[in-house]
Image: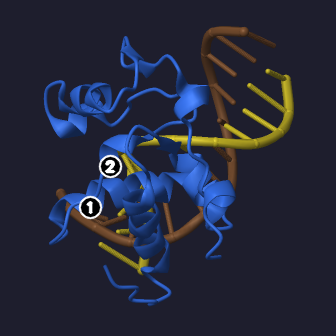
Chain colours: A blue, B yellow, C brown
Amino acid sequence: MVFSMNKNNLFFEIVYQVVELIPEGRVTSYGAIAAYLGSKQSSRMVGWAMNASHHLSYSIPAHRVVNRNGLLTGKSHFGGNKMADLLTQEGIKIEENQITNFKEVFWDPSKELTIL
DNA sequence: GTGGTGACGACAC
DNA sequence: GGTGTCGCCACCA
């Protein structure tokens, strides 16, 4: 994908970029991405970016983004049990819509990435 | 133009 | 430590 670098959409662009970089079998949180962008208080915007990602021409692994508790809050937006299913396929343990081994699979962009 | 809402998170109580 | 409240800002009615 391409960085548009419009300051209005910069937040969204980087969110998509980061989400695309999440390795298989790993997950990250909205807050982690927001923190990576330097505005941890805008975590809601990360969630909104995921919501907006549906109308993108390309698709991003939004199922690898969960909230701070490892809870699959966005599950309902995927329809059915799709989100938990995809994560399970990648070796992530899900129980009651929550990632049981969240610590182990957590992927922190601010530690794993160095582009910012 | 205004107000309410949201795939969240931090802090106060 | 559970619950409430606020901040964040794009989007929609």
- What is the number of the mark on residue A62? 2
Residue A111 position, x and y percent, is 68, 56
> Callout 1, which amino acid?
Ser
Query: Few, some or many C-alpha atoms within 10 Å of disc 2 (few <14, some 14-19, many ≥20)?
Result: many
Kindly identify the residue that appears in the image at 30 percent across and 25 percent down: A88
Residue A67 position, x and y percent, is 50, 36
Residue A85 in the image: above or below residue B10: above
Query: Few, some or many C-alpha atoms within 10 Å of disc 1 (few <14, some 14-19, many ≥20)?
Result: some
The local secondary structure at tag 1 comes to: helix
Distance from the alpha carbon under mark 2 to that under mark 1: 8 Å
Kindly identify the residue that appears in the image at 40 percent across and 85 percent down: A3
Q: Where is residue A71, by image quadrant?
A: top left
Answer with mark 2 or mark 1, whichever residue precedes in sequence: 1
Q: Is residue A62 visible?
A: yes
Residue at mark 2: chain = A
The local secondary structure at tag 2 comes to: helix
Contact between marks 2 and 1 (CB within 8 A): the answer is: yes
> Callout 2, which amino acid?
Ala
Residue A1 position, x and y percent, is 31, 79
Residue at mark 1: chain = A
Q: Is A8 on the left or on the right of C13, as rendered?
A: right
What residue is pinned by disc 1? Answer: A53
Q: Nearer the viewer, residue A105 or B13?
A: A105
